[in-house]
């Protein structure tokens, strides 16, 4: 009797693509599985056999694994940070989240969210306390950054699942055209973080933080809600900060093809501004503030910032997808509210749109993935009013409006499999930049010769081409050539300063970049090495023109520079040094960044290096993870000296900081506890600075001190 199998099927269930050799392997596997029962039938001469369906199901990739797989398909420098790993120690600001990321500089001044963040030197001259520039920030793929830059109060670690770091043109997917690339924060959902959680943290300098969260699934819907409250008295005098906020993520799946998500972030924050010191003051007592900061009572009040985002995804029959996003962002702020010197009131309201279509198909008979995207960020209401003294009792000194300023980006990209091992990535972005700056009131005449109104509107192109070649399935070399466009922030033409009662005619910065690198992972090693060089035209640089006094605020100006160079090395490596049979692991994590940023041939400063960032930065941690959940590690951060002025006459000194952390993460994930020790030797060091024009070798008050020795602890309970 001839035997015919009832059914044989192979089901591959994974969110990652199966291409090249992996697809061939899957096909061979399917064929072998189909032939196996037939071979058995030939041996069965008398006995009739009935075989049930054979199903092979691959383990479905987690969201983090899927995100890492997508990043690995970008021919350039990227990184991914799991928040669960960060929370094995202090998680107070993005300084903690973005540690050990090559090419990324993230340092807090004063312990609040207004930290200094720079990728590849983009926005390196922007001091702490200002909106971030030179890098695009997103939540769940939806823009936070607008035409005015990035407000910082929402840049906290609450409710995060993981963070994607895409350096330079490698952020093409998110419509980011800036030299620094993009940072995308991905929120927990009810699917990834079900259950309830209570977390309490505290430590040195009066730091306290309490977090409550809950998440779950109800039919086709899921939800995640997190609330937090924090305060810190501060290491440096006059750096008190307090904040509270809410993060939510609601999802609904209408059918297998259509799903939508609603994200809401709300945060209130108040902090006193860190005061810049001279090097002599910092060495004598790094916890002091400067007299002008104390006298003018400089502070920042975020009365309530609201970010509401919606993202809807539709999957077509051919597995192509259409993703539509909409964001409303309202973020008012008051600077120097308690000051008798120029308190200023800012009104910011943005609306952001995005639309992206992605299709996997054949092009010239080769596997191809094509994407078409459009994104827009626009001020629908924005401006600042500066007063002399209290708003209600003082008089209006200056009013500026930025309404209608926008960035529109249209992008077309393709990833083409030339062979099983070689892939070509191409892309072209067109950006329309509009800046509308109107100084519509000033209590003093404009004698500068610069107009009081500036309107700039222009289209620019940013092409990109890259290659990646797989030496093995887990090791690849890559390279790309790209062009970046950085429009000036709306407020940089004319901000709150009463002496700058005019609108500077700033133009977008542009750069051509070449990047080469290698990345890979094995049982022992996981790392990457990237080299890049950018030729920049009209770089947007900041400089302090006049320092703050007891009767006036500091005057900081932005200008387009003569041609500059940004080049560097970004290296990251995690090595498994030893593993016991019971699962204990000793690992060594390292990150090294070389920052070489300088003028090409400036008439005044020749080839001087640009101030703001150390040339060399190294971070390392020796970490022992016990199989039973206990862990302990020692870490180091070392930075070389940093130029303070464009004349390179004054440098902040180099430093090395030591730290340690230990804790316990219960195997059943019911509770966690940690102890994190920072700056064990109580080293005085400079964490950030205010660039000056020419210090003439003098010790100027341009240096922000970092925290002294601190101990931080936290405990979390999940139920």
Image (tube, grey):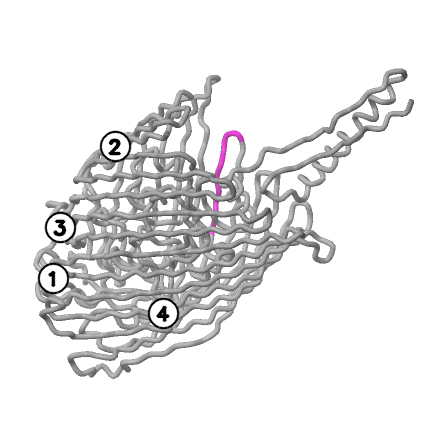
Between discs 2 and 1, the one toward the N terminus: 1
Task: Using the image, determine if residue 696 lies above or below residue 318.
Answer: below
Q: Main secondary structure of the magenta part?
A: strand
For label 2, the residue is 713
Disc 2 is placed on an element classified as strand
Quarter of the image with the C terminus in it: top left
Q: Residue furthest top?
A: 46
Residue 306: horizontal and vertical position, in percent? 32, 56
SS for callout 1: loop
Foreground: 658 or 172?
172
Task: In the rendered view, tell whether residue 194 sits above or below residue 596.
Answer: above
Q: Nearer the viewer, mark 4 or mark 3?
A: 4
Magenta extent = 523-531
Q: How far apart are the two marked residues, 4 and 3, measured between alpha carbons? A: 35 Å
| Left or right of residue 453, residue 650 in this image | left
Residue 614 placement (x, y as % from top left): 31, 50
Badge 1: how crowded within 10 Å, few (<14), some, or many (20+)?
many
Distance from label 3 to label 1 (Cα)?
A: 13 Å
Query: Mark 2 against mark 4, which lies toward the viewer?
Result: 4
Say whether disc 2 or disc 3 marks the residue closer to the N-terminus. 3
The quadrant of the rendering that contains the N terminus is top right
Q: Secondary structure at mark 3?
A: loop
Residue on which the image places disc 4: 380
Q: Which mark is residue 238?
A: 3
First in sequence: mark 4 vs mark 3: 3
Q: Residues within 10 Å of mark 3 (few under 14, many from 20)?
A: many
Mark in the foreground, 3 or 1 = 1
Q: Would you name the residue on which mark 1 appears?
A: 339
Left or right: residue 19 versus residue 168 is right
| Tag 3 and tag 1, C-beta contact below 8 Å | no
Q: In this picture, is 158 found above or below 322? A: above
- Disc 2 from disc 3: Cα separation: 24 Å
């Amino acid at each position: 009797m001839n035997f015919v199998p009832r059914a044989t099927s192979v089901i591959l269930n994974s969110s990652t693509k199966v291409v090249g050799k992996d697809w061939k392997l899957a096909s061979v596997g399917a064929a072998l599985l189909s032939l196996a029962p037939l071979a058995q039938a030939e041996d069965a001469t008398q006995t009739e056999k009935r075989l049930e369906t054979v199903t092979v199901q691959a383990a479905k990739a987690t969201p983090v694994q899927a995100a890492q797989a997508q990043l690995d398909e970008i021919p350039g420098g990227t990184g991914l940070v799991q928040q669960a790993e960060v929370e094995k120690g202090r998680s107070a600001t993005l300084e903690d989240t973005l540690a050990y990321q090559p090419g990324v500089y993230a340092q807090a001044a004063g312990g609040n969210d207004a930290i200094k963040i720079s990728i590849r030197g983009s926005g390196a001259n922007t001091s702490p306390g200002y909106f971030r520039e030179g890098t695009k920030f997103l939540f769940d793929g939806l823009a936070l950054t607008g035409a005015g830059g990035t407000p910082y109060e929402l840049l906290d670690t609450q409710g995060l699942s993981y963070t994607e770091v895409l350096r330079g043109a490698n952020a093409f997917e998110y419509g980011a055209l800036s030299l620094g690339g993009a940072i995308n924060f991905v929120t927990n959902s009810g699917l990834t973080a079900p259950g309830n959680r209570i977390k309490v943290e505290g430590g040195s300098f009066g730091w306290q933080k309490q977090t409550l969260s809950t998440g779950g699934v109800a039919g086709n819907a899921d939800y995640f809600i997190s609330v937090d409250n924090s305060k810190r008295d501060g290491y440096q005098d006059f750096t008190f900060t307090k904040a509270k906020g809410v993060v939510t993520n609601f999802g609904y799946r209408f059918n297998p093809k259509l799903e939508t998500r609603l994200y809401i972030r709300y945060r209130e924050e108040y902090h006193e501004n860190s005061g810049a010191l001279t090097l002599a003051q910092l060495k004598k007592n790094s916890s002091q503030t400067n007299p002008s900061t104390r006298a003018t009572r400089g502070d920042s009040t975020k009365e309530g910032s609201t970010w509401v985002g919606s993202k809807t995804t539709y999957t077509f029959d051919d597995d192509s997808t259409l993703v539509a996003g909409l964001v409303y962002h309202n973020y008012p702020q008051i600077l120097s509210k308690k000051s008798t010197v120029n308190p200023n009131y800012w009104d910011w309201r943005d609306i952001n749109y995005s639309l992206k279509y992605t299709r996997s198909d054949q092009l010239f008979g080769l596997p191809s993935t094509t994407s078409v995207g459009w994104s827009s960020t626009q001020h629908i209401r924005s401006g600042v009013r500066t007063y002399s003294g209290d708003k209600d009792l003082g008089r209006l000194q200056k009013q500026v409006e930025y309404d209608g300023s926008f960035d529109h980006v249209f992008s077309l990209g393709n990833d083409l499999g030339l062979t099983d091992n070689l892939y070509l990535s191409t892309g072209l972005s067109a950006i329309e930049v509009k800046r509308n700056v109107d100084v519509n009131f000033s209590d003093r005449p404009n004698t500068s010769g610069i107009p009081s109104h500036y309107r700039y509107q222009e289209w620019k192109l940013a092409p990109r081409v890259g290659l990646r070649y797989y030496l093995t399935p887990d090791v690849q070399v890559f390279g790309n050539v790209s062009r970046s466009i950085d429009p000036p922030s709306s407020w940089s033409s004319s901000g709150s300063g009463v002496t700058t009662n005019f609108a500077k005619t700033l133009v977008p910065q542009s750069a051509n970049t070449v990047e080469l690198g290698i990345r890979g992972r094995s049982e022992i090693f996981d790392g990457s090495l990237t080299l890049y060089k950018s030729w920049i035209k009209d770089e947007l640089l900041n400089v302090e023109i006049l320092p703050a006094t007891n009767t006036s605020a500091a005057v900081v100006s932005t200008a387009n520079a003569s041609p500059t160079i940004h080049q560097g090395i970004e290296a990251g490596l995690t090595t498994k040094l030893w593993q016991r049979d019971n699962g204990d692991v000793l690992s060594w994590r390292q990150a090294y960044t070389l920052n070489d940023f300088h003028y090409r041939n400036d008439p005044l400063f020749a080839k001087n290096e640009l101030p703001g960032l150390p040339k060399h930065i190294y971070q390392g941690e020796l970490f022992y993870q016990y199989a039973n959940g206990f862990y302990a590690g020692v870490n180091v951060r070392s930075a070389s000296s940093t130029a303070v002025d464009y004349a390179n006459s004054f440098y902040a000194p180099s430093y090395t900081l030591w730290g340690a952390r230990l804790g316990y993460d219960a195997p059943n994930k019911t509770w966690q506890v940690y102890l994190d020790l920072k700056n064990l030797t109580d080293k005085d060091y400079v964490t950030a600075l205010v660039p000056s024009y020419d210090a003439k070798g003098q010790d100027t008050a341009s240096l922000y001190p970092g925290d002294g020795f601190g101990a931080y602890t936290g405990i979390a309970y999940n139920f």
